[in-house]
Image (spheres, grey):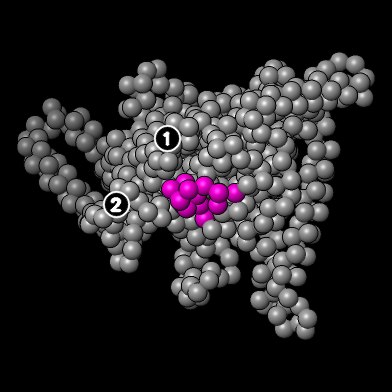
Amino acid sequence: MTADVSGSGARTDGPTRRAGTWSEVFRQVPPRLLRLGALGGLLIALGGVGAGAVLRRDPLLTGTILNAVRYGHGRDLATAVVFAGVALMAYSWVRLGRMVRAGQVDGRGVVLAAAAWTAPLLIGPSLYSRDVYSYLAQGAVALHGFDPYTTGASVLPLSLGGNVASLWQDTPSPYGPLFLLVAKCVVAITGDNVIIGAVLMRLAVFSGLAMLAWAMPGLVRHLGGRTSVALWLTVANPFVIAVGIGGAHNDILMVGLMAVGVLMVLDGKHVRGIAVIALATAVKATAVLVIPFLIWVWVARMSGPARQRFFQACAVGGITFAGVFALSTIIAGVDLGWINVLQSQTPLLTWMSLPCAVAELLYHSVGRHIPGATYEGFLGFFRSVGVYVLAAVLVRQWWLARAGGVDAVRRAAIALLAASVLAPSVLPWYFTWALALAAAFAWKDKWLAIAAGFSVWMVLITLPDGTIVARWHYGSANPVVWWSYLAVTVLIGVWVGRSLLERRPVWALVRELRARSGKTDQPTRVVDQSTKVVEPSTKVVEPSTKVVEPPARVVEQAPPPDIEQAPPAVEADDVGEPDAAGQQRGSTGG
């Protein structure tokens, strides 16, 4: 059974579809959908062997015929395989989203699909970024007795340091002590084997996705969304799977811990929740942004004067946060040098950073015609403006959240989104910060479609080797090809959003129109046949009018069959629940 879906994506009536056993969960999701998404993940992993962020010297491929996939036409073919996999996964995700909106798949069904689609990538090569090699190098630096907050990967042997991107060879680690401890443990286990080390690091990051899936039903309970929609937006999202897990980004581990901590605070376990968020901050500093908002949640539940409640929550929360963070720092054997690294880190240039986008567009369209104007000057000015605007947004959102409750968490998600957009350097996977919390709220159809299109667009503008298309140009790349590809990715993103909300796939409507056009003469033929049947019976009953007269009157009073009032023929794939507008909704999407 299914339930109707309102414009916000929430069920308006009908029983909640909750599978009792895992066998029923397997029956919820069409096997073809699971296979297509899993095939997409497999193609992404296979194509990544040649098109991904490959090793400088691959011990498995070097000296074999398979090494050809890393160069020239072989690499082009591998890239095509990756994009074919992305297409299959995105198609499966949109179809699953249509079923989720229709109430045909619950949260566990979404988790099942996400697990099937993610599994091939867990043991695949690094994709969409070389960050995992930096993680291993930073762990090796710490393991060999160097200070990772002052020493870069260039001090390491070629097998570990040589695979780090040239930009980060001499850059110290900007990550917290807990993540350095994880990286150090991985290197202690795998040694110089970068391939196994990358797989283990991805498994560590995957634990964050598992924590996010565990916390999401509880967050939805507090924040008013739907579990299936929230999980579809996060753990089953191709953006999270391909870029987050495929690239083994520690952001996924951070948001998993952050989601668990926020859930604990909402459940009334304030001290434990802040302790868990301290661990998330010890992975990546961004998680600290939610602490001030959760203080308001805690204050709203206390009794007594407002000022006393505020200072009490700040004192207990601050002591808890500092204690957990200090303990992780001591166990990792490092200091607080990473704070200085964050302040001095060289920013990257992408249009995901709104200040960078404005600076590049204005300079190339207007600024280069102004005497004395420089490209670096434009970038520096707008990045500074972005930092001030970000600070103002954070302070304003924090102050507006002082009522606590659900609104405080909503404004924490806005703060994370602002940090993703206004920071001097923004990378695609930074948008998982806000998504982890925002997914648990109720979503209107329009915003759900925008989120879906944006997610697929983020996958497409990040090439398998880590090149990000969203910028004015990239080195010697042909600008015609560059801008054409960027335009195509935008169109695909729009198509994905529209497809999620489409009542029925286009080809289903075409089949129905053909079926109707082929049966235009059917009503006339049916009426003629009914006349032929009635006429012989009239002739037979004429001699004995008294006996058959009543049946004859019954025949005359019966209305002729009105074929036009019968419902039109519908293909089996198009049968589904009516949507909020009363139109037929496809059960499998498109």
Would you say the residues marked 2 and 1 are in contact, meaning their CB atoms lie under 8 Å apart?
no
Report the front residue among 106 and 384: 384
Q: Position of residue 540 (x, y in %)?
A: 6, 37
In this view, the residue in front, 296 or 499, is 296
* Badge number at residue 190: 1
Give left or right: position of 374 versus 575.
right
Reply above or below: 379 against 322. below
Q: Amino acid at mark 1?
A: Thr
Image height check: is 123 above or below 107?
below
Q: Is residue 516 visible?
A: no
Q: Is residue 355 above or below residue 412?
A: below
The label shown at residue 61 is 2
Query: Which residue lies at the image location 42% right of the left edge and 41% below the top edge?
Result: 192
In the rendered image, residue 171, in percent from the top left (x then y), is placed at 62, 51
Q: Residue at x 71, y 61 (%)?
A: 355
Crowdedness near tag 1: few (<14), some (14–19) or many (≥20) residues, C-alpha within 10 Å: some
Q: Position of residue 264 (x, y in %)?
A: 65, 21
Q: Is residue 161 magenta?
A: yes
Q: CA distance from mark 2 to mark 1?
A: 19 Å
The residue type indicated by label 2 comes to Leu
Q: Give the residues drawn in magenta, as a range.
A: 152-165
Q: Quadrant of the N terminus?
A: top left
What residue is shown at x 67% (from left), y 29% (from top)?
A: 329
Please, what secondary structure does the residue beneath circle 1 have?
helix
